[in-house]
Amino acid sequence: MSTWIRNAWIEAVKLKRLSDIRRKELRQAAFAVLEREGIAGATLEKVAAHAGASKGIVLHYFRNKQELFEHAMREANAVLRDAVVARLRQARTPMERLDAVIDGNFEEHLFLPPLCHAWLSLCAEVPRDEKLARIQKVLHARMRSNLLSGLHGLASPEDADDIALGVTALIDGLWLRLGLEPGSVSREQAIRQVKDFVAARLAMRQHVTAGA
Amino acid sequence: MSTWIRNAWIEAVKLKRLSDIRRKELRQAAFAVLEREGIAGATLEKVAAHAGASKGIVLHYFRNKQELFEHAMREANAVLRDAVVARLRQARTPMERLDAVIDGNFEEHLFLPPLCHAWLSLCAEVPRDEKLARIQKVLHARMRSNLLSGLHGLASPEDADDIALGVTALIDGLWLRLGLEPGSVSREQAIRQVKDFVAARLAMRQHVTAGA
DNA sequence: CTTTTTATTGTCCCACTGGTCAATTGTTGA
DNA sequence: TCAACAATTGACCAGTGGGACAATAAAAAG
């Protein structure tokens, strides 16, 4: 019995080591191809080639093309999540938590045109792929919740909601800018832009509140 | 000579009436297909079918698929431009000009999920299509310039630049939201969001200026 | 009425794509 | 060593897409 459990455990590890490693390679390859080719040009053969494998292997690990790209989006989603969570862990004050979310969304190795292009291509498919829509929704909900956890102490609930919506939209918009005109907005500019937004809106509400 | 000029003129009108009407129909059909199918699913046959014609006719009026969708983007661009320009014409004060740009970008018959989906699909192709990039750049430059014409009287040139960037990003971000989660942001919400942004940033700069 | 353009269609072609499958080659466990 | 199993490949297939083209209808021009 003990050996059986041990074997099962080892097998599980093996699966993590064998099968899941390939899966990760493949969905990263899928994402890389998406960066260069867009959704229309991203073919199974190109993904396989980029991963140094044959097309057959891609369909061995993923039921079909759709599933592959859904996993590619999950991957990207997870990377962004980790970037924010890492910073969030070190945040103490509400303001620091806000900054964690903002800085995390513009990290140097993330806020890059190719990554943005792939992200855009996936977003463009959201309306036609229920799974992508769900992933996107979760990503957005998490960002929103992270922002609210910082905003709670700084504004009324309604204002917090409102500002959170604005911040997410602004962040997305700055990413879009990067994708449409690389170089038209720098990392630092983007961060400052969002932080100024938060500061301005918070200050304004205080005035309104004080005036009312 | 007079008749020659007259004929040439008539011919030009005829061209507008015959050839260009078809071209307009076709690029509008292209856009409509884009709304439903995305760039990957938008095929010449579907565009032709949507226009009630044959695939051959599409390639008779447009050199190839790329050119067709470039013209589709120009069309969409022009619609947005007209919406803003119409409002801009009636604006008197700088603040009214700002509002014209904002309101124009969220007009009822424009701020709709399907339109947004098509726009997203085109944006996703921008990195791979020089012409699309140019169109996009022009659109952005015009929006920026319109905003600056309103901001000049209300903020310092540097602040105006900064705020204009923020406004364009925020507008784009709100559109993106509409595309990714239709219903998560209403027209009125979007407009208020942008106007609050402008108000907050203008107020803030004034305070900083006053304090310095 | 004839000639010359223009509009339009349907057919054909070729490259390519997603997906299936049988066959081959390791790997693992007993 | 052998049997079971996973990994991996390459061949194959049916469908589709973009685009070329010749043929035809329709108009315009003269």
Image (cartoon, coloured by chain):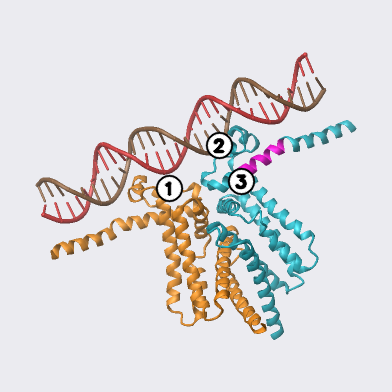
Chain colours: A orange, B cyan, C red, D brown
Residue B45 bears which disc, if any? 2
| Residue placed most toward the observer, B126 or B106 | B106
The mark lying in front, picked from 3 and 1, is 3
Q: What's the residue at 42%, 64% (across, down)?
A: A78
In the structure shown, which secondary structural element does the residue marked by tag 3 occupy? Answer: helix
| Residue placed most toward the observer, D15 or B36 | B36
The residues bearing labels 1 and 2 have C-alpha atoms spaced at a distance of 26 Å
Disc 1: which residue: A46
- Give the main secondary structure, helix, strand or loop, of the magenta stretch: helix
Q: CB under 8 Å between callouts 2 and 3?
A: no
The residues bearing labels 2 and 3 have C-alpha atoms spaced at a distance of 14 Å
Residue A159 bears which disc, if any? none
Q: Could you classify mark 1 by the number of other residues whose Cα lies within 10 Å: few (under 14), some (14-19), or many (20 or more)?
A: many
Q: Could you classify mark 2 by the number of other residues whose Cα lies within 10 Å: few (under 14), some (14-19), or many (20 or more)?
A: some
Q: Residue B21 in the image: x percent, y percent?
A: 71, 38
Quarter occupied by the C terminus of chain B: bottom right
Disc 3: which residue: B31
Q: Residue A91 in the image: x percent, y percent?
A: 46, 79
Q: Could you classify mark 3 by the number of other residues whose Cα lies within 10 Å: few (under 14), some (14-19), or many (20 or more)?
A: many
User: Is residue B166 in sight in this rendering?
Assistant: no
| Residue placed most toward the observer, B8 or B42 | B42
The mark lying in front, picked from 1 and 2, is 2
Amino acid marked by disc 2? Glu
Q: Residue A188 in the image: x percent, y percent?
A: 57, 71
What chain letter is assigned to the residue under label 2? Answer: B
What chain letter is assigned to the residue under label 3? Answer: B
Q: Which segment is the magenta one?
A: B19-30
Amino acid marked by disc 1? Lys
